[in-house]
């Protein structure tokens, strides 16, 4: 967390000199780049820090008696339809839409949730979906410097 504070203080002095339109463009670029990184991490079943997700519990048999293979977690949650970006001259945000936010929170924090309509609940293991890693902080620094060099 200290690295983020250091990055913030470093960038604040430089960004206050930019016009609001230029800051908004930079924030949009940052948000899109960070969303792409988050999508890649979710696709390869990896947390932002690089740790693998706890694998899905194996379902022994389907209704037809066939053995199921273990499917990937979150096949659709990483789509741009559900993983949104927003940018202003003050912030860049990557977040899940309202439709999948509850599912994302349950898995991100490892909470309990209902599994079926009969009320069976299960505690899910923590699988962090969104976050900043050291490589993301380096990416932010590079993008800020690129933007300042162009502008």
Image (tube, helix red, strand yellow):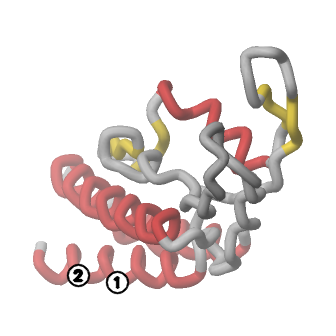
Q: Quadrant of the C terminus?
A: bottom left
Residue 80 in picture, x, y percent from top left: 31, 47
Q: Are marks 1 and 2 in contact (CB under 8 Å)?
A: yes
Mark 1, residue position:
142
Q: SS for tag 2?
A: helix
Q: Residue at x 74, y 24 (%)?
A: 116
In the displayed structure, 48 sits above or below 120; it is below
Task: Please state the horizontal and vertical placement of residue 59, each as a whole percent of the image.
Answer: 73, 52
Residue under the image location 11 percent in, 78 percent down: 150
Q: Quadrant of residue 1?
A: bottom right
Q: Is residue 132 visible?
A: yes
Q: Which residue is pictured at 81% across the width and 15% down the height? A: 118
Q: Which residue is mark 2?
A: 146
Q: Nearer the viewer, residue 20 or 40?
A: 40
Q: Position of residue 110 (x, y in %)?
A: 81, 48
Using the image as rendered, state which of residue 119 and residue 60 is in the foreground.
60
**Rendered image: mark on residue 104:** none
> Can you say whether 29 is above or below 80 in the image?
below
Residue 9 seen in the current view: no
Q: Dot 2: within a 10 Å radius of its alpha carbon, few (fewer than 14), some, or many (20 or more) residues?
A: few
> In the rendered view, does 18 fall on the left or right side of 116?
left
**Circle 1 — which element?**
helix
Local packing at callout 1 (Cα closer than 10 Å; few below 14, some 14-19, many 20+) is few
Q: Is residue 150 left or right of residue 53?
A: left
Q: CA distance from mark 1 to mark 2?
A: 6 Å
Q: Residue at x 43, y 52 (%)?
A: 78
């Amino acid at each position: 967390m200290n690295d983020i504070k250091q990055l913030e203080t470093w960038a604040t002095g430089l960004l206050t000199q930019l016009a609001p339109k230029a800051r908004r463009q930079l924030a949009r670029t940052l948000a899109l780049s960070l969303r792409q990184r988050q999508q890649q991490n979710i696709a390869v079943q990896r947390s932002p820090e690089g740790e693998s997700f706890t694998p899905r519990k194996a379902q022994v048999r389907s209704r037809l008696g066939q053995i199921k293979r273990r499917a990937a977690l979150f096949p659709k949650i990483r789509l741009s339809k559900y993983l949104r970006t927003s940018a202003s001259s003050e912030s860049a945000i990557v977040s899940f839409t309202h439709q999948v936010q509850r599912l994302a929170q349950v898995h991100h924090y490892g909470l309990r949730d209902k599994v079926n309509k009969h009320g069976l609940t299960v505690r899910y293991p923590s699988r962090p979906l969104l976050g900043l890693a050291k490589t993301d902080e380096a990416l932010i620094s590079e993008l800020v410097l690129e933007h300042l060099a162009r502008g």
